[in-house]
Image (cartoon, rainbow, N blue to C red):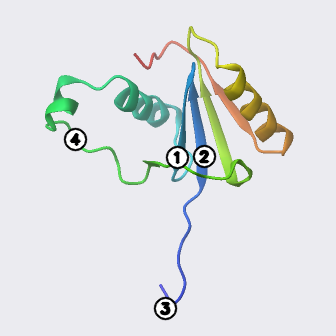
Amino acid sequence: MQSGTFLITPLGLIVYGEDHFLIRGPKPDAAMARYLVRRWIFPSIEDLLGTSPPIPADWQITTSEFRENIEWTIVLSCAQSPSPAVAQLVAEIAARGVAVEYLSGSESVE
């Protein structure tokens, strides 16, 4: 890396029901997206005790971002619908031309 330059990691959004996460990192595949949500929403005893493997450093939750900077979006299937605010955010992202990937299937986050 040259002096004076820096790398900005992509900003993405993962939606699971009423929960949503702004994520700095590359767009994860379906399995990793489910894994990240599982770790962030449903921590295990091992997570709470600090004995589980760390979450890969490629992805970090972030706050205070501009929605205009979101480059990827994943919506995971859930029995609960997104809140109206989250649904509106996803619609705005899609209207900007950002692909929204809807993942459903038999793999559960819980």
Q: Foreground: 53 or 63? A: 63
Quarter of the picture holding the C terminus: top left
What's under tag 1, amino acid-wise?
A: Ile
Label annotation for residue 88: none
Rendered position, 69 above or below 22: below
What's the CA distance linking mark 1 and mark 2?
Answer: 5 Å
Using the rendered view, name the quadrant where residue 39 is placed: top left
Q: Residue at x 56, y 14 (%)?
A: 78
Secondary structure under the numbered disc 3 in the rendered image: loop
What's the CA distance linking mark 2 and mark 3?
Answer: 27 Å
Rendered position, 109 above or below 12: above
Q: Which residue is mark 3?
A: 3
Earlier-in-chain disc, 2 versus 4? 2
What's under tag 3, amino acid-wise?
A: Ser
Q: Position of residue 56 (x, y in %)?
A: 35, 48
Q: Position of residue 108 (x, y in %)?
A: 45, 16
Secondary structure under the numbered disc 4 in the rendered image: loop
14 on left or right of 109: right
Q: Which residue is mark 1?
A: 23
User: In the image, which is nearer the foreground, mark 4 or mark 1?
Assistant: 1
Q: Foreground: 98 or 21? A: 21
- Is mark 1 in CB contact (under 8 Å) with mark 2? yes
Q: Residue at x 72, y 35 (%)?
A: 100
Q: Which residue is mark 2?
A: 12
Label annotation for residue 53: 4
What's under tag 4, amino acid-wise?
A: Pro
What's under tag 2, amino acid-wise?
A: Gly
